[in-house]
Amino acid sequence: MKKISKIIAILVVGAISITFNSCSKAKKLSEEEKNDLRYLREEEKLARDVYLYAYSLYGEDVFSNIASSEQKHMDKVLRLLNDYQINDPASATVGVFNNAELQNLYNVLASQCDSSLKDALIVGATIEDVDIFDIDEFFSHTSQKDIIDTYEKLNCGSENHMRAFTGKLEDMGYSYTPQYISLEEYTAILSSASGGCGK
């Protein structure tokens, strides 16, 4: 009987500890950090949704492959939202966003995709350009290791995607000029080899 009581006591203390740790973690973030994660969750969804739309237009594997990667990016950010007990802003509907800025951007980019395959590839490069730019800024807003690790993985993925889209453009005889990141950063990305970005 004493043994059972001791086990129950250990379990209760453990449960209290888990709850306390969870609440502590939720309180660690500033509003800026929370807003960055909310925005990034929908920004990764925007990338996925635009690429799914472009794939429906042109059937190019680069769009479907990168859309799948963007879904993984969305999942990584969702894990952080859950860990820090932040409500998920992402709609389950493709092409629908709670953030008005991202909704407008999706509408503009999807419309540009309609013009041609070349324009759709430029849209892809532009999305990765702005993603890298935003994450570069988000790095400066946090010191949380799990968030920094996620940002690093997402940036690595975006650099791979940038190389894929610009490579397709070059195959067609076109080029892309960065609009958000610096020319130096863009050149460094293109000169680096694509690789795995971790799980």
Image: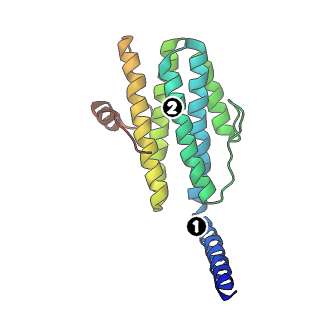
**Secondary element at tag 1:** helix
* Numbered badge on residue 156: none
What amino acid is found at the position of numbered circle 1 in the picture?
A: Lys
In the image, 146 versus 7, the foreground residue is 7
- Position of residue 140 in the picture relative to residue 43 (left or right): left
Residue 101 in view (yes/no): yes
Picture coordinates of residue 98 (x, y %)? 71, 41
What amino acid is found at the position of numbered circle 2 in the picture?
A: Ile
Seen at 65% across and 59% down, the residue is 85
Vertical relation: 172 (above or below) 79: above
**Secondary element at tag 2:** helix
* Numbered badge on residue 25: 1
In the image, 182 versus 53, the foreground residue is 53
Q: Earlier in the sequence, mark 1 or mark 2?
A: 1
Are circles 1 and 2 on residues that touch, CB within 8 Å? no
Quarter of the figure with residue 6:
bottom right
- Position of residue 39 in the picture relative to residue 93 (left or right): left
Vertical relation: 179 (above or below) 1: above
Q: Which residue is mark 2?
A: 127
Quarter of the figure with residue 48:
top right
Quadrant (top left, top right, bottom left, bottom right) of the C terminus = top left
- Position of residue 45 in the picture relative to residue 92 (left or right): left
Dot in front, 1 or 2: 1
Picture coordinates of residue 59 (x, y %)? 54, 14
The span from disc 1 to disc 2 (Cα, nearest Å) is 31 Å
